[in-house]
Amino acid sequence: MTEPVHVFGSFGWLELKITVGELALAISTLAAAYWITRFIQKRQANDEATRDLMIKLCEDALQELSALSGAMEDCSSDCKIEDAGRQRIRRHMQRFSNSVHTIEVAAAKATLNKLTHRITEVKDLRQTLHTQITDPLVTDPGLNPDQLRQIEGTVRQTREALITLQLAIIQQ
């Protein structure tokens, strides 16, 4: 048996002795625990930053969707949409489309594969909204009340899909 580095003395039935090997084992165990803890904290910080970014991108998309909805509200039934109004609607539609694309790209870069279904749902609704808005603006002088109701229904569904996506991001 090796000689202990230090003998702490006896306390009745308890005798404390530390060898060099035991000391080295204790130090290496503490060092490993420290580095593992740092690695886990760094990974958690990265995951949290990714979640925060994705939530911010969803909020941006919701803002653009609200702006688009506001531009659509300027079109009352039986009204002719002037060129400036058409340009404003198209601009808001493009901004919303860009924000959805940014969410898709960010999720792919962050390898958030669990969100693919939710993002696809938002993209499909974006495409439906684009068709509902763009086609009448190209062919008709304005939007009729039925078209406006359909657009508002799709806006509501899109808003719900974006909120559901946000909740899925938070729960990850």
Image (cartoon, rainbow, N blue to C red):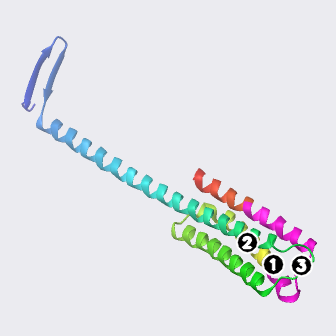
- What is the CA distance from the residue labelled 2 to the residue labelled 3? 17 Å
Tag on residue 169?
none
Q: Measured along the vertical axis of the image, is residue 159 above or below residue 19?
A: below
Q: Toward the viewer: 52 or 107?
A: 52
Disc assigned to residue 68:
2
Q: Residue sitting at 87 percent across and 72 percent down?
A: 76
Read off the magenta span. 131-159
Q: At 80% across and 72% down in the image, what residue appears?
A: 74
Q: Secondary structure at mark 1?
A: helix
Q: Considering only order in the chain, which callout, 1 or 3, is on the residue closer to the N terminus?
A: 3
Residue behind mark 1:
133
SS type, badge 3: loop
**Circle nearer the viewer, 3 or 1:** 3
| Residue carrying label 3 | 79
Q: Amino acid at mark 1?
A: Ile
Task: Specify the amino acid type for callout 2.
Answer: Leu
- Residue 115 sits in which quadrant? bottom right
Is mark 2 in CB contact (under 8 Å) with mark 3? no
Q: Are marks 1 and 2 in contact (CB under 8 Å)?
A: yes
In this picture, residue 42 sits left or right of residue 150: left
Q: Quadrant of the N terminus?
A: top left
Decide whether residue 135 is among the magenta residues: yes
Q: Position of residue 4 (x, y in %)?
A: 8, 30
Three-letter residue code for mark 3: Cys
Question: Would you say 55 lies left or right of 96 here?
Answer: left
